[in-house]
Image: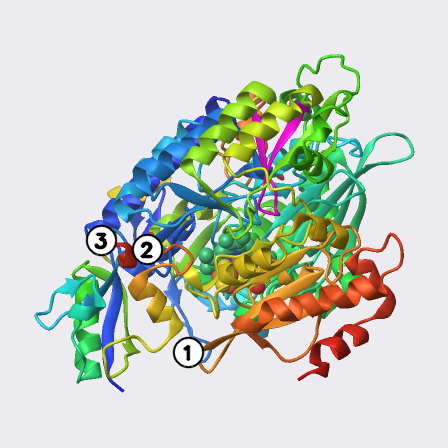
Amino acid sequence: MPQVLTANRLSDGEVVYLAPDGTWVEGIDAAQVVNDADAALATGQQAERDRKIVHAYLFDITPNHRPMKMREIIRAAGPTVRTDLGKQAR
Amino acid sequence: MYRYDEFDQKLVDERVAQFRGQVARRLSGELNEEEFKPLRLMNGLYLQLHAYMLRVAIPYGTLSSRQLKMLAHIARKYDKDYAHFTTRQNLQYNWPKLADVPDILADLATVEMHAIQTSGNCIRNVTSDHFAGAAADEVDDPRIWSEIIRQWSTFHPEFSYLPRKFKIAVTAAPKDRAAIKVHDIGIIIRRDPSGALAFDVYVGGGQGRTPLIGHLIGEGIAAADLLAYLEATMRVYNQYGRRDNLYKSRIKILVHQIGADEMRRQVAAEFAEVKQHGALALPQAEIDRINAYFLDPAFEKLAEEDLTAQRKTKAFAAWLDTNVAKHKAAGYAIVTVSLKPIGGIPGDANADQMDLVADLAQRLSFDEIRVSHEQNLVLAHVRQRDLFGLWQALDKANLATANYALITDIIACPGLDYCDLANARSINIAQALSQRFADLDRQRNIGELKLKISGCINACGHHHVGHIGILGVDKKGVEYYQISLGGSGAEDASVGEILGPAFGEADVPDAIEKLIDTYLAARQPGERFLDTYRRLGIQPFREKLYAAH
Amino acid sequence: MPLIKDNAFVENTFAHVADEETLPEGAIVVSLKRFQAEREMLLARNTPLGLRLTSDQSPEALGPDVYHFAVIELEFPKFKDGRGYSWARQLRQRMGYKGELRAVGEVLRDQWLFMHRVGIDAFEVRPGTRIEDFRAAMAEQTVFYQPASDRVRNVLDLRHSRPARIAAE
Ligand code: HEM
Ligand code: SF4
């Protein structure tokens, strides 16, 4: 199962994803598909120490780069009951 | 209502400065997340699905217009123009930035508000009857005692690292509007035969994973001894409450395991010691001082108003019948401002609505607003002659849905749309049910019905004590909903019974409709849903619901 | 571990002795188990004696024996384990213990003030702690609603112009 590394940005709590260039991006489309889970988690821990993000973890995505679980679908878009808010509204 | 004196203000101001320092230490890296987390939680700051979430305390649910306006201002300036009123009479902002939170707390402090102890394993915000001071059936204003408890519990040095969170609720009326029997400590104030106030202390109620009804542990405690009794109860819990298992760490489990009699004995022994030392005895001067803040506002001498003419407006008449309750003073009324518009999000209010309610309260209700644990707002002291104008103003802002205590007056927790702990969404279910039962005549025909929804077993949406309770569960990544019947959070408190296998999201409205139809077909005159359920038991409902499956 | 007392670092003159270890000369701290097993012998020694209580050990059972100790250490295995706060108040207020009450274990900055308020007067802190941090943390809050074991006038005392009430003595 392909995976993506996610976290919340320390300063404002925004949901972010690890991109191929090592930066943290707001949209899941630009997220890196993780091949090496341990290496990705280590990157996450380093970013936590660097005070960029909090609570990094991996989650499963579908072959067409969408989250599998409701929780991650909602994090990637925003509240389903307020489609005017969150990433889906941008 | 209560106003801070120099000491209360200084305490809150110092706290803001302290948290500013803690946030700075976090952002500079001096504190890591593990160290910072308990500190931010002590200030009501969570990390949720989309962002941080800040929980602001509204002690015993009472706000001034100025305070509500500040809450609206903060929603505009730092958040996304709205906020969520919770079942614990608090308010939650869903999108604050960490770096802004010290400024938000500083703004709150200018109107005598804070986020202290809205999270963490400490004594949380004290909740009370939202009709306090206005209800005809109360023996004293429970907010006097809630305020006394609030002060005693704030930064209590001994009870800030309890085994688990601790919730206290207070009522002074025989009709329990504060769900006191499902709190860690619930207090009923009554008068003893001599006319003195007497406090009955229920201990060990709660919801969550193990719903239990509180036991009467302290009976007829005298006013001056209230804090000593609470301190004794807390000390027994702090010493002997379980710390090895998160799910068994609430005081209800301690009471359940050692038994109510043993709990009573231990608390009594501790109480005798605390009392003997005397330092916690409440000075009458302090009781009087706080009492003075809760004296009746200057009610005019009025006659009961004849509203026959206005009742010709059908929508107003409906609202009058459901959302307006009897006030203790002639010519006045208690108004529930519904935060449950049909298809809306229970408990959410936008900044403009908050401002409007604040203005209306200022003009028409002695500058005071209440937040109810049912996630509505209350204007407690409205002249009956102002009701029609008030209704018009509320109606324009979509705040006059005539559904108080009816099936669409749904309690729902934020669920998976916001909450990090959720298994399933709950707001979507509330919206679907609200739409299904939108017809007001039908709602009124069904009568009082408390429908409560939680997105996981933590039960923030009180589903265990709903006449109908709905619990979101996750079955292999799909949201399902388990229905229970027969709960009550009122004076006749009970925990609901689970009906059977859970339903998929789309099937919930039909299932609820079948339950309602079963009740309507079986009810006897004057029976609420809960009464019919209690008379017949769960079987007829179960049969109807699962017959077709 | 550095030890703070009276707003300054002080030297820890007490040696910790494990239950099976032979007793060294000088001031020692032993477990409750060892104290109970070897009470007579320990009391007969002519050097200061300390006791360490784990967070699940109530001091109540000690009775008048508390007066024999120069130091009682309350262990906080995790900062979240708050039983020590109640044991401290029992010792100070109910049992009249006047010796040093020392917090050991996970004793973090944001707990110091509350510990002080319940009667703890010595703090084993993390290496690297600066004394300025300690002083700053102790000064962050100056307003207290409850009577506790410190001698501070609480809000009720101030509001109603009465002297500080210490919940005992
Ligand atoms: C969104 C963040 C929230 C989190 C992380 C959260 C967490 C929890 C947890 C873990 C429990 C169970 C405690 C236990 O069983 O020991 C609980 C219970 C409860 N929460 Fe929340 N909650 C949240 C939001 C809310 C909201 C929005 C409300 C009000 C609408 C609320 C009101 C309650 C109530 C009334 C209970 C049941 C009483 C109790 O057992 O304490 N919570 N919450
Ligand atoms: S009941 Fe569960 S899902 Fe709902 S707010 Fe509480 S913790 Fe979150």
Q: Which residue is mark 2?
A: B51
Residue C7 appears in the figure: no
Does label 2 or label 3 sit earlier along the sequence?
3
Q: Which mark is residue C21?
A: 1
Helix, strand or loop for disc 2: loop
User: In front here: B44 or B274?
Assistant: B44
Secondary element at tag 3: loop
Query: Residue B429 versus residue C122: which sits nearer the camera?
Result: B429
Residue B304 position (above or below residue C113): above
Residue A79 visible at all? yes
How many angstroms separate mark 1 from mark 3 (CA)?
A: 39 Å
- Numbered disc in front, either 2 or 3: 2
Instruction: Give whichever of C19, B274 is nearer the camera.
Output: B274
Magenta span dominant secondary structure: strand
Q: Which mark is residue B30?
A: 3
Q: Chain of mark 2?
A: B
Q: What amino acid type is highlighted by mark number 1? A: Glu
Bin the neighbour count of mark 2 within 10 Å (Cα to Cα): few under 14, some 14-19, many 20 and up: many
Query: In this image, B265 relative to A66: left or right?
Result: right
Query: Is B113 situated left or right of A24 in this image?
Result: right
